[in-house]
Image: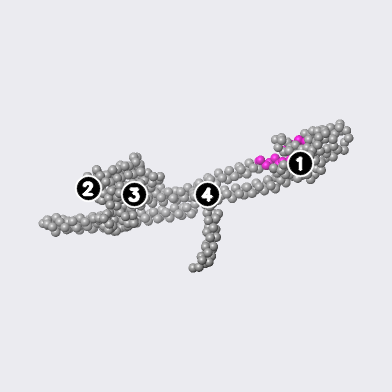
Amino acid sequence: MSSSQTASSETKARPRARRVSLHPFRALKRFLPRGLFGRSLIIIVAPVVILQAIVTYAFFERHYDVVTSRMARNVAGDVTYLIKQHNTLETEAERQQLREVAARSFGYTIFFLPGEYVARAKPQTRSALDRALARVLTSQVSEPTNFDTNRYPQYLEIKVQVSQGVLRLLVPLNRVTASNADIFILWMIGSSLVLLAVAIIFLRNQIKPIEHLALAAESFGKGRAVPDFKPHGAAEVRRAASAFIQMRERIERHVQQRTEMLAGVSHDLKTPLTRLRLQIAMLKEDTDTHAMGADLAQMEHMLNEYLDFARGEGGEGAEPTDIALFLEEAVRDASRARANAASRIKLIATPHLILPMKRKALKRCLVNLIDNALKYGNQVEITARQTGRTVNISIEDDGPGIPELQREEAFRPFHRLDESRNLQSGGVGLGLAIARDIARAHGGDVVLEQSWLGGLKAVVRLPI
């Protein structure tokens, strides 16, 4: 490929990457709530808030401005009339009488400042009232005029030039501003709060059935019973809940049928094995009978492993269990078959850590892992501690361990490692497969890691 073609392809690829990195919705997702309740609330409240903001803006920028301009024109008309009448009168007594009559008629407070002047200055236009007054007074009053809307909280001060002085007028603010603006804002805020409260109550009632369905599915996935779950809520949620109940019943029925079938298979196969064992026991003991007895024991052991793997303890119910006491029982069971095993095990467990579990199944999982650690290591350390919403039970040893690339292969059913350490030696390759199957039936998992002791670390992760 030529350099020009390479530059051309890079030029084409660069704008595409820039468009992806600057996508606005990807950046917005970081600030959006992840829960259904929060997102539904935004869907309902956001359009209403936007609509009310537009209405409020239109009211203040159009309606409020129009009303204020009309009221300002009335005040400007009063000022214009007062200026003309004041300038036509010749004596101060007549002008004083005019000011008194105008004050009573208009409701203004009027002062006459003789000998002063009003310089034309650019008025401040910080608010809608300032803009309306500046526009109206400039267009209707020809004499120099100044006004101040901030000097007095309840009055508007207007200074206008007349003959021989300045008229200073204090006009009540309710003569130039709409009095219902604050009420309108309160109504907008109040209606928004009422809408928000109704939306929260309504959405909470609609989200609860979905949360119950999620909790039921999570509990069932952890192997825990959910007998009190019933469909309720919207039609779609009821349909999903009914489908979940039917799925749960089919799974439980399948597990029950499989357990019953395997119990029958176990009985049928163990009967001829027992007869063979009795026949061998009646024969003269020699090397051949001893070998046949060992073969029968191995066949029985293999049969038990097959049945344990297929059965999975599906019929056992979960019950709250103290992890520390439970691990002590598992250590005793695993130590019975090996001499001095108890002295080789160090147990560290958080006291009073309660977890619902299927005791028989999980004990088989832990005994299997502890037995493997005792088989391939001299020292074994077992720890149990809670990390967030998970309980981690670690079984570590100082044995040869398993290479990292082969750790997942060790979980494959009927798979035996070829390395110096074989977790299923003497078996059929189901030890770790059974342990992981039991842990996953509790909603957790079993993983293999490198131990600080130098050997293998098997971690059983169980959700709370």
Q: Nearer the viewer, residue 66 or 251?
A: 66
Q: Amino acid at mark 4?
A: Phe
Q: Nearer the viewer, residue 301 or 143?
A: 143
For residue 306, side relative to residue 214 (left or right): left
Q: Which residue is mark 3?
A: 459
Residue furthest left as drawn: 284
Write the residue at 77% across / 34% down. 109
Q: Amino acid at mark 2?
A: Arg
Residue furthest top as drawn: 93
Residue furthest bottom as drawn: 1
Task: Tell me if residue 259 comes above or below residue 96 in the rendering.
Answer: below
Label 1 to label 4: alpha-carbon separation: 49 Å
Label 2 to label 3: alpha-carbon separation: 22 Å
Write the residue at 44% across / 48% down. 212
Percent across and percent down for residue 256 are: 32, 54
Task: Tell me if residue 301 comes above or below residue 167 in the rendering.
Answer: below
Percent across and percent down for residue 395 are: 31, 47
Q: Which residue is mark 4?
A: 31
Sequence-wise, the earlier of marks 3 and 4 is 4
Can see residue 154?
Answer: no
Tell me the quarter of the picture where residue 424 sits. bottom left
Sequence-wise, the earlier of marks 4 and 2 is 4
- Disc 3 crowd rating (10 Å Cα; few below 14, some 14-19, many 20+) is many
Tell me the quarter of the picture where residue 272 sits. bottom left
Sequence-wise, the earlier of marks 1 and 3 is 1
Write the residue at 33% across / 50% down. 450
Label 2 to label 1: alpha-carbon separation: 104 Å
Q: Nearer the viewer, residue 276 or 444?
A: 444
Q: Which residue is mark 2?
A: 338
Label 4 to label 2: alpha-carbon separation: 58 Å
- Disc 4 crowd rating (10 Å Cα; few below 14, some 14-19, many 20+) is few
For residue 326, side relative to residue 92 (left or right): left
